[in-house]
Image (tube, helix red, strand yellow):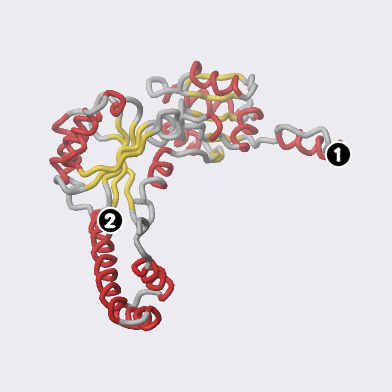
């Protein structure tokens, strides 16, 4: 943790002690999913203070560590060596050391290596401490309008067409939002499978390169999704979060539009026959809408055209 020169000497001592007071534990550290600025102060402090950093790809993690001037020892823990690496990490913990576990981007053990290590460490009797941070799922949901109600994170679908179809069969009757990860080379096939499973009218949100320079979040009906992806080579580049929209979202939007149109028609008739104040009062009684909303709409209806 950096300390500004204007702070008291005693505060510097306390800050320094905080940096080097990690417990003898495994720290599951979330790293940025694209934008390095999304790392948390706590994650930086943990990576600086850990005796060892266990990472999915040492070359990728070194870019992050170098950016924040972190020189700690790193070891590789990936899907091909995770079981053996877990034994090595337990050995480090038995020696009283602290270990920070990271993946190339995002949170370890969530659609990324790490779960084997976490479970092994817990069984061995050592503490596992999460250091939360940026999440592609939550970031995409927050910008999709689908995060208010229930949703299910389903991770990656199977790569084989048959297995993917069978997996989607279990979700066909689901009415709440579904969230998937997908890679660029499979995104078109995956969206086509979603079309078969959920039909033309269901909407999806394609969140590409979330937090990165070429981030793009696009909402489209499934009937048009493949055509949109294939309309521009850039549309299929990068990592995807794919959200199958809640079935009620489109219905609610259509209902709200129809309701607003009916309110405007009713108010226009009242305004043409009555003074503004009386028209607003009667519209409130008829529709149950808030007075301020109806009054603003009535003023807009009464206003002369801009070109007059």
Q: Secondary structure at mark 1?
A: loop
User: In this rendering, which labeled residue sits more in front, label 2 or label 1?
Assistant: 2
Q: Give 305 or 116, whichever is nearer the viewer.
A: 305
Q: Quadrant of the N terminus?
A: top right
First in sequence: mark 2 vs mark 1 = 1
Q: Nearer the viewer, residue 204 or 173?
A: 204
Q: Of the numbered discs in the image, which one, if any, rests on residue 8?
A: 1
> Residue 99, located in which quarter of the rendered image?
top right
Give the image location of residue 260, x and y in percent.
Answer: 29, 66
Q: Position of residue 162 (x, y in %)?
A: 13, 32
Q: Nearest the camera: 292 or 194?
A: 292
What is the quadrant of residue 74 in the picture?
Answer: top right
Q: Are marks 2 and 1 in contact (CB under 8 Å)?
A: no
Whether residue 158 is visible, yes or no, is yes
Which residue is denoted by mark 2 in the rendering? 249
Residue 185 position (above or below residue 16): above
What SS does tag 2 mark? helix
Tell me the residue at 29%/50% (across/down). 177
């Amino acid at each position: 943790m950096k300390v500004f020169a204007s702070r008291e000497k005693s505060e510097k001592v306390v800050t320094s002690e905080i940096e080097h007071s990690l417990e003898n534990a495994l720290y599951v550290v979330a790293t940025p999913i694209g934008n390095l600025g999304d790392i948390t102060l706590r994650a930086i402090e943990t990576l600086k203070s850990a005796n060892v950093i266990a990472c999915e790809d040492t070359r990728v993690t070194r870019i992050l560590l170098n950016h924040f001037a972190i020189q700690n020892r790193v070891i590789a823990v990936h899907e091909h060596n995770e079981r053996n690496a877990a034994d090595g990490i337990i050995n480090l913990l038995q020696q009283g050391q602290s270990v920070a576990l990271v993946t190339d981007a995002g949170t370890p053990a969530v659609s990324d290596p790490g779960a084997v290590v976490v479970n092994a460490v817990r069984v061995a009797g050592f503490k596992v401490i999460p250091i939360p941070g940026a999440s592609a799922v939550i970031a995409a949901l927050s910008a999709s309008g689908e995060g208010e109600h229930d949703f299910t994170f389903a991770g990656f679908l199977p790569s084989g067409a048959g297995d993917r179809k069978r997996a989607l069969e279990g979700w066909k009757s689901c009415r709440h939002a579904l969230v998937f990860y997908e890679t660029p080379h499979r995104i078109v096939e995956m969206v086509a499978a979603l079309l078969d499973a959920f039909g033309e009218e269901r909407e999806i949100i394609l969140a590409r390169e979330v937090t990165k320079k070429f981030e793009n979040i696009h909402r489209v009906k499934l009937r048009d999704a493949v055509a949109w992806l294939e309309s521009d080579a850039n549309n299929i580049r990068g990592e995807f979060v794919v959200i199958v929209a809640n079935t009620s979202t489109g219905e609610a939007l259509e209902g709200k539009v129809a309701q607003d149109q009916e309110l405007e028609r009713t108010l226009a008739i009242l305004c043409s026959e009555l003074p503004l104040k009386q028209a607003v009062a009667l519209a409130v009684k008829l529709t149950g809408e808030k007075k301020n909303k109806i009054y603003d709409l009535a003023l807009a209806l009464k206003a002369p055209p801009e070109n007059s």
